[in-house]
Amino acid sequence: MSRSISTGLFFAALFAIIKCLVFLAGKHEEWYTFFPLLNIGLVMFACGIGMWLTRDAKGNFPAGALEKIRAGMRSGMVYAVFTALFIFIYYKSIDPLFVYNRIKERTTIAEKMDFTKIQKENPEKYANKSRNDFIHDEKEQAELWYSPFMNATLSLTGLMICSLFYSIVLSFFFKLLTTRNKLKPG
């Protein structure tokens, strides 16, 4: 197994361990917004370290920018796939109550809304619907958006985009770094 793939697997395992530890500590509801930020940081480290490990024995990076980007993407994509798989398993099996609570919260908000005001603001959408139809539609939307599959799909897509972006940026950063080191005297 190449070092860049191992790097992606290492950071995906690190994410899974941190997420499980936070769940076991009972802080997963409060720290929900922390995990997208953690994902963004870990995919950056996976791309950067994966790219760094592609240097040859003399410490030189591959000559072309595309080889560096490909090395970073390899680590980032492995991280993205395994993290998305873990997220699906996590919300499907480990913490299904989280999804249930989010759907219940969204339904409660819909029940508290003034439906007549909503009908007046959107007559073409809600003219032939009752309050119960509106609440049912909101629940269906919440079930779709908070489902484990949707969480995993959105995470995979977002991490792939971040991986591409970070690989391009880090490729130019490492190019500047190696150019700068070659220009130093002695």
Image (spheres, rainbow, N blue to C red):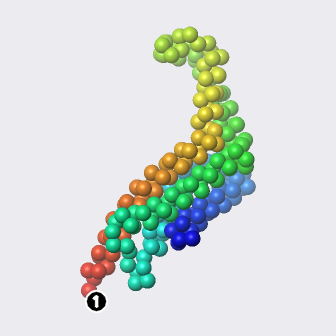
Left or right, 186 with respect to 104, comes to left
Name the amino acid, label 1.
Answer: Gly
Q: Nearer the viewer, residue 5 or 115?
A: 5
The quadrant of the image that shows the C terminus is bottom left
Residue 86 image position (x, y, % from top left): 64, 53
The residue depicted at 54 percent of the width and 44 percent of the height is: 154
Please tell me in which quadrant of the rendered image residue 116 appears: top right
**Callout 1 crowding tier (Cα within 10 Å): few <14, some 14–19, many ≥20:** few
Q: What residue is pinned by disc 1? A: 186
Q: Nearer the viewer, residue 64 or 27?
A: 64
Left or right, 67 with respect to 95, comes to left
* Residue 164 can be seen in this image: yes
Residue 159 image position (x, y, % from top left): 50, 52
Q: Secondary structure at mark 1?
A: loop
Above-or-below relation of 56 to 153: below
Above-or-below relation of 71 to 152: below
Residue 102 image position (x, y, % from top left): 65, 37
The residue depicted at 42 percent of the width and 79 percent of the height is: 56
The residue depicted at 64 percent of the width and 42 percent of the height is: 148
Q: Seen from this angle, which residue lies furthest bottom?
A: 186
* Residue 31 can be seen in this image: no
- Count of marks overlaid on the render: 1
Q: Seen from this angle, which residue lies furthest top?
A: 128
Residue 167 image position (x, y, % from top left): 41, 61
The residue depicted at 66 percent of the width and 61 percent of the height is: 17
Q: Seen from this angle, which residue lies furthest front?
A: 1
Left or right, 171 with respect to 99, comes to left
The quadrant of the image that shows the N terminus is bottom right
Above-or-below relation of 183 to 45: below
Please tell me in which quadrant of the rendered image residue 80 appears: bottom right
